[in-house]
Image (cartoon, grey):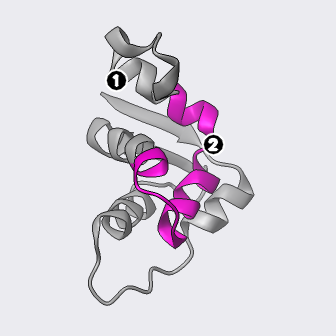
Amino acid sequence: MIFKRKLTKEQYEVLMRPIRAKQAGGYQRVLERLQKATDPTTMECQISVDDARRIADYSIDYGEGGYQSRLRQIFPEGVRAEWRRQLNPSKSDQGNLL
């Protein structure tokens, strides 16, 4: 399964900001994959199931930081919550996950 998301101009600009880390960690690698998976003409991003899960998890489970903030700006809570529902249908009614 691939999640497709058409980004706004602002979200696209946030996504395409340079990644300045000398050694890319988890957040940076996700952003690099998303940059490569986004069509610059249509601003449509294709997100793998694994990356959708990481984005939803990173943005709520791993605190604050530059790359976490970027992910939250690109993929608002409503999008992340929908992915969590689709990826974990048995848990969709547990409010603490949303």
Camera-nearest residue between 97 and 85: 97
Kindly indicate the quadrant of the structure image that contains residue 29: bottom left
Query: Residue at image x 40%, y 55%?
Result: 62
* Number of residues whose C-alpha sits closer than 10 Å to that of mark 2, classed few (under 14), some (14–19) or many (20 or more): few
What SS does tag 1 mark? helix
Q: Give coordinates of residue 47: x percent, y percent.
A: 39, 43
Query: Residue at image x 33%, y 9%?
Result: 90
In magenta segment, residue 97: no
Kind of residue at disc 1: Leu
* Number of residues whose C-alpha sits closer than 10 Å to that of mark 1, classed few (under 14), some (14–19) or many (20 or more): some
Which of the marked residues, 1 or 2, is nearer the chain's N terminus? 2
Camera-nearest residue between 39 and 3: 3
Query: Residue at image x 52%, y 19%?
Result: 95
Query: Residue at image x 62%, y 31%?
Result: 78
Camera-nearest residue between 81 and 35: 81
1 with respect to 17 (left or right)? left
Give the extent of the magenta segment: 58-82
Could you tell me which quadrant the N terminus lies in?
top left
- Residue at the disc numbered 1: 87
Identity of the residue furthest to the front in this view: 96
What SS does tag 2 mark? loop
Q: Give coordinates of residue 64: x percent, y percent.
A: 52, 63
**Mark identifier at residue 76:** 2
Is 83 situated above or below 73? Answer: above
Q: Give coordinates of residue 66: x percent, y percent.
A: 53, 72
Q: Give coordinates of residue 91: x percent, y percent.
A: 37, 14
In magenta segment, residue 75: yes
Kindly indicate the quadrant of the structure image that contains residue 31: bottom left
45 with respect to 2 (left or right)? right
